[in-house]
Image (cartoon, grey):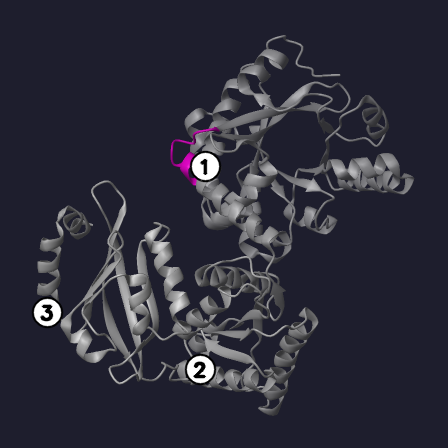
Amino acid sequence: MENKVLLSAMDNQQITEVFQALNQTSDDYFYILDFMEDSYSICNRAVQRFHLSTDYICPVSTDLREVVVEEDYPVLQKELELLKDGKKSFHDMEYRWYGRDMEIIWIHCRGTVVRGKEGNVRLLVGSITEVGKEEKRDRLTGLYGESRLALDAERMLLKEDGNGFLMLIGVDDFREINEKYGIDTGNSLLRELTGIIRECMEPGMMLYRLVADEFVLFCQNDISSERVRGLYENIRENIFRHIEEEDYRNFYTVSAGLLAAPYLSGTYGELVKYLEFAMSEAKRRGKNGLVEFSKNDYDAYVSRLEIKEELRKSIFNNYEGFTLYYQPIVDAKSYEIKGAEALLRWNSSKYVSMSPGVFIPVMEDSGLIIPMGSHVMKEAVECCCRLKKYISSFHININLSYVQLKKTDVLEELRVHLGMLEVCPENIMLEITESGYIETDLSFRQAMEEIQSQKMRLAIDDFGTGYSNLRYLKDLRADMIKIDRSFGIRAMESEYDYTLLGHIIEMAHSIGLGVCLEGVETEEELVKLQRLGPDFIQGYLFGRPVPENVFVEKYLETGRNTAMEN
C-alpha cells in the first residue's frame, strides 16, 4: 500500500527512474502501463527477447498488438478495460507473446493498479515472467491446467453466440482416500479417472485439471442437456465398470456441477464460482450425482451467507437487535397460566424483522447458535426468576439446539445460572425438537439422561412433524410432548387424524407424559381439541409472543393469571 501511494505521488520522470532501477535487479521484465497517456514502457531486455520494435509503445490500444498472439489479444483487451475502469485492481494472466523470431512464448503477467492523487486509475505496474515455448501441462495427468482453461473460457465469453457447457467433476471424499491409502493411490486414481473421462469425451471437447481432484470438461459445440447428462452417466458407469474389473480394490464416486450456455457470467472467475457452487450442491445432495447450476439456488445460498454475516455482527455487538419474547402456556381446563415459552426475535438494521424459521437454521449451520443459545439461556432464567414472584410454580420453556448439546456443556452452564439466581431446576423445561439424532447419537441420549438427573424437565417439541417415534419418548423419559399445529389442523379436518391424535394423547398419558397442543388459534379449535384431553394449550387464542414487560402487564399484574385473547 505504501509503495502504491509513493508511486501515485511521483511525476513521470521519477517513475521512470524507479522503473529503470527495478529492471537491474531481476530477470523478470518490468513494465508500466500509463492509462492516462495510453502508453506502455518495458525494459530494454524485453525488446531483445520479444517481437517489440521499441521499449516504449504509444498508443497501447494499437501498437501492443504486434507482440500479443492475435487469438489472445481480445482477452487481454477486455482485462485492460476492466482495470482502466476500476473494476479490477490486480492483473494476473497467462497468455502468449511472439518472440523475436515470431516463435510463441507463454508469459505470466502480473500487475497492480496505482491511482492518482484524486483517486482516478493512473498506472498498471508489474512484471512479466516467461513460462516457456510450450503450454504448461499437469505432470500427473498430462492435461492442460487452469491458466489454459482461463484463456479458453475468456475467449469463449467474448463470443456473442457462445454454445456448449462447462462441467466440473470432483472425486467424492478424495482427502479420505489419500489419508487411508496414501498419496500414491490417490495419484493413481486421478490418472485412471483422466483416462475414463477422455474415453467418454466427444469430438470438440477439452479436459483440464483445475486443482487437486477437480477436472473441467469444456465444450463449445451446440449440445443438448440430455446428451450432457448422458455423458456424465457414461463417465459414472465406466468408473464403476473399472472398479469391478479391479475387484473393488479402490472404490470411489464422482460428483459434478454443470454450467450450460447461455452463460450468466462475463468473466472466467465467475464461471468457476458458479461451477464450484453447482458441484458443492451435488455433494450436499448425497454425492455421486450431477447438479446443473441454478441462479435461484445460488442467490439463496448467497443470501444465507449475508444473513450469517449480519447475525455474526449482531451477536458480537452485544446481541444487538435480539429480544426474547414470551408466549403463555395455559392449563387446558382452567386456562390458568402455568408458564411461558421463550422465543427469540431479531430485528436488524439490514433485514428489519426476520422469521426465526429463517435465521435460526443459519445460526445452527454456522455454529452461531452456541453463543446465541448461551445468551438466551441466561436471559430466560433471569426472566423466570422475576416471574416467580407472581406465580411460584411458573416455568420457562427454553429451546435447545442439537448443536448446543453436541458441542458445548450447555447443562453445566444452565446449572450455574440456576444456582446464581436461586431458580429451581423444576422451573425450567428444556424443549428439544425431535430428530433422528435422538435415537442414533449416544452423546445426545446421555445429555437427555443428565437433564433428568438434574431434575430439569424435558419436552419433545414439534411432535408430529419429524420422526415421531413413541418408543424413544419412553426411553428418554421425557416429561411432555408438544403437538405441532400442523397435526392439530389435520385433526380438525380429518376424522381419522382426530382419532389418531386422541390415541397419541392417551398413549402419552399411559406412560406418564404430559401433552401440550401448540398453535390453537380459534375457539372452534379449542372446543374440539379440548375433548381429546390435553394437559396444556399454547397458541394465539391465549396469547401471542410478547416482550417480558408486556407479558407481565397483560397476564400477571391483573392477579387473574388467566389468558384469552379472543
Observer-side mark, 3 or 2, equals: 3
Q: Secondary structure at mark 3?
A: loop
Q: Is 215 on the left-hand or right-hand side of 19? A: right
Residue 7 on the magenta span: no
* Residue 465 percent across, percent down from the top left: 72, 45
* Disc sitting over residue 143 in the figure: 2
Q: Which residues are magenta?
A: 312-321
The answer to whether residue 400 of the structure is visible from this angle is: no
Relative to 143, say whether 258 is above or below.
above
* Crowd rating for badge 3 (residues with CA inside 10 Å; few <14, some 14–19, many 20+): few
Residue drawn at (59%, 70%) of the image: 164
Residue 292 visible, this orientation = yes
On the image, numbered disc 3 is attached to which residue?
A: 25
- Which secondary structure class fits the magenta region best? loop
Amino acid on which disc 2 is placed = Leu
Instruction: State the SS at label 2.
Output: loop
Residue linked to disc 1:
374
Give the CA distance from mark 3 to mark 1: 58 Å
Q: Residue furthest top?
A: 558
Asked if the residues shown at circle 2 and circle 1 are in contact, with their CB atoms under 8 angstroms apart, the answer is: no
The residue at the point 35 percent across, 73 percent down is 95
Q: N-terminal of the two: label 3 or label 1?
A: 3
User: For residue 428, which quarter of the picture?
Assistant: top right
